Amino acid sequence: MTIQRPSRNSAALRCIVLAMAANLSAPGIAAAPTASPASPSGASAPETVEAFLARAEGELDAATEASNRADWVHATNITPDTDWLSSAARNRLAALSLDLAREAAAFDPTAAGPVERRKLDLLRRLTNVPPPADKRKAARLSALQTSLSSNYATGAFDFQGKATSLRQAEDLLAKTRDPEQARLLWEGWRESAKRLKSDYAEMVDLSRQGARELGFADMGELWRAGYDRSPSQVEADLDKDWAALKPLYAALHCFTRKRLSERYGASVQPRTGPIRADLLGNMWSQNWGNIFDIVYPGPVERPDIDKYLLAAGYDPMRMVKTAEGFYVSLGFDPLPASFWTSSQFVEPADRAVDCNPSAWTIDNRSDVRLKMCIRVTRAQFRTVYHELGHDFYNLAYVKQPFLFRRGADEGFHEGIGDFIALSATTLGNYKRLGIVPADAPGGDDIGQLLQKALDEVPLLPFAVALDKWRWSVFAGRIAPDHYNDSWWKLVAEYQGVAPPRPRPADGFDAGAKYHVAENVPYISYLKARLYQYQFHEAACHMAKWKGPLHLCSIYGDKEVGTRLRQMLALGGSRPNSEALALFTGSSDADPRAMLEYYRPVLRWLEKQNGGERCGW
C-alpha cells in the first residue's frame, strides 16, 4: 500500500485493538435502569460493577492473546490449517466479546464511577465486526472474515503470462510510464478482488444483525462511535475537515492533471475533468509520490533516496534498527529482544504470508512485533517509522488496565509514527545518518514540499470516499448489485479520478483495498493526518525551532520525548481531547497545522495553475 500502511490490522487486532478504539460515550445503547446482573456463578447476590470489570478484563486478556497468536501464525504462514486455527480463535473471541458487551449493557452506567463507566461503555462496543447472538450465524461470520482475509492476501492475476501478486503489481505500477501497462496492472488487481464480493455482502448482512443487537443501527454507526463524539458528530466533523483541506488537494489535483496531460497527451489524460486512476503510480490513487518525476517541472535535483539507501548498504534489518534509533533518541527505551527474534522483516521464499505491513502486540504487554516484507526504498523506510510508532505507543501504555491499553483514538495510533516520520525523512536527517552525503545537492525547497504533498495529501479524499461508501453499504442504502457504480460515483466526487475504461457493474473495486477485506475503518487515517501535523507543529515549537515546519527535525530532543511519552502513557484512559491537549495545547483535531505546513507549496501551485480549468 506504498506510503500509508495499515497497522495492527490482523484479524485479532481488528477485533480488539481497533475495536477498543471505539467511543466510550455509548450513544444508541440503552442501559438497564435497574440493578446489575446476577453473578455468573449462580449466587443470589448480584455481581458488582467492579467485580464484573475485573472478570471481563481477565477473560479478555487471555482470549485476545490466544487469538493474536493464532492470527500471527496465520498471517506468517497462510494455509488451510492456519485459516482454520485463526477462524476458530476469532470465533471464540467474538463470542466472548459479545457476551461481555451484553453483560455490560445490563449495568446502569449512571450508578458507576467515571473509570468504571468508561470501561462499561467501551465493553459495549468491544467488537469491530459484531456477530449475531445466534451461534451458527456468529460462526459463519467468523469464517467469512477469515475467507476475506486469506483471499485478499493470496490474490493474484495474470500479467504478461505470469501470476502477479499485489506486492509485485504495486512495484510495477509505481515505476511504469507506459499507460497501457499501467491499465493492465490496475485492472488485473481489481479482477482478482472481485472474488471477495459475495463473502463481503454476506458479512455485511450478518454484522448488521449483530450491531442492531448491541443497539446500533449498523456497523457504520458503531465505527463512528470511536472518537469520544456521537456518530453523527463524527460524520459532521469529517465533512468540515474535508471542506477545509479540499482547496489544497484541488490545487495539487489541477497541477498533476496538467503535467500528466503534457506527458501523455490529451487523448490519454485530458486537461480537464478527472485524472485517470492508473496513471498516478499507486493502486488506489491515494499516494502520488511515485510520479514526482512527471509532476515536478524543474530539473530533479533532489537526492534519490532509494539509490542512496542501497549505496549506503542498507538492508531491511538496518532500516528497522535506524528507525528504532530515532525513537530512542527521544528517550524511549529500545525495543525488547523478542521484537527482533519474533518479527517478520522479509518475505520468506517457502510459504505464503501476508506482506501487508502491520504492528502487533501479541500478549497485550511487551511482546510487540512488526510484520513486513521490507524492500529497501524511501517509501518503505517511511513505513517502518510509521509501524514502529504503533509498537512504541503500545509499550507506552502497557501499565494501563487491559481495557485502556489502546490509543486515545485510532487516529492517534496511526498519527504517531507519521509524526515521527516528518522529522525522520527530512534531508537533514538523511545527511545526519550518512545516507545522503553532506555535500549532496538538496534540490529546491518547493520540490521537497511537492514530493511530500504528493505522498501525503491524496490520502485525504480517498479516506472520505472509502468510509462514506462503507457507511452506506452497512446501512443497507447500497445493495451488492450497485457496489461498483456507487463506489465510482464517490471516487469521482471526492478524489476526482476515474477508471481508464468503464468498470463492470458486477465488479467489486472497493474490495481491491486491504482495509475493506479486513474491515478496518479508514477515517482514522484522515484523523491521523490532522494529528500528525498538529503533533509536529507542537513538537517543533517545544524544540524552539525557527524556520519552516517542513525542515524541522526533533531528533534527540528529550523534552519533546518526555511530553510525548506522557501523552502516550494515558492510552485510552482519558478522552482523546485531553490527550491531544496534553501535548499540543489544543483539544480539537484541526486542519490548520497541515495547511500551514504546506502553505509555501500551495501558493506555488496556485501560481502554476493560472489559466487552468481546475476542478473535476
Image (cartoon, rainbow, N blue to C red):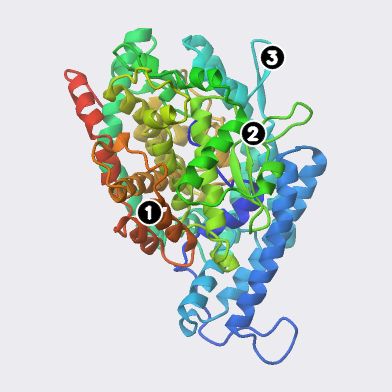
Sequence order check, earlier mark of 3 and 1: 3
Q: Secondary structure at mark 1?
A: helix
Q: Is residue 297 above or below residue 95?
A: above
**Residue behind mark 2:** 355
Q: Amino acid at mark 1?
A: Glu
Q: Nearer the viewer, mark 1 or mark 2?
A: 1
Can you give x and y, in whole percent of width and height, for residue 59 in the image? 70, 69
Sequence order check, earlier mark of 3 and 2: 3
Look at the image and tell me in which quarter the C terminus lies: top left
Q: How many marks?
A: 3
Instruction: Residue at 55%, 15% (x, y): give it.
Output: 184
Residue 559's tag is: 1
Q: Secondary structure at mark 3?
A: strand
Q: How far apart are labels 1 and 2 at the CA level?
A: 36 Å
* Residue placed most toward the observer, 256 or 215: 256
Confirm or deny contact between disc 3 and disc 1 (CB under 8 A). no
Q: Amino acid at mark 2?
A: Cys
**Residue behind mark 3:** 162
Dot 3: within a 10 Å radius of its alpha carbon, few (fewer than 14), some, or many (20 or more) residues? few
Can you give x and y, in whole percent of width and height, for residue 451 in the image? 36, 25
Instruction: Residue at 55%, 23% (x, y): give it.
Output: 170
Note whether residue 522 is visible.
no
Dot 1: within a 10 Å radius of its alpha carbon, few (fewer than 14), some, or many (20 or more) residues? some
Left/right of residue 318 with respect to residue 280 in the rendered view: right
Confirm or deny contact between disc 1 and disc 2 (CB under 8 A). no
Q: Amino acid at mark 3?
A: Lys
Q: Secondary structure at mark 2?
A: loop
Q: How far apart are labels 3 and 1 at the CA level?
A: 53 Å
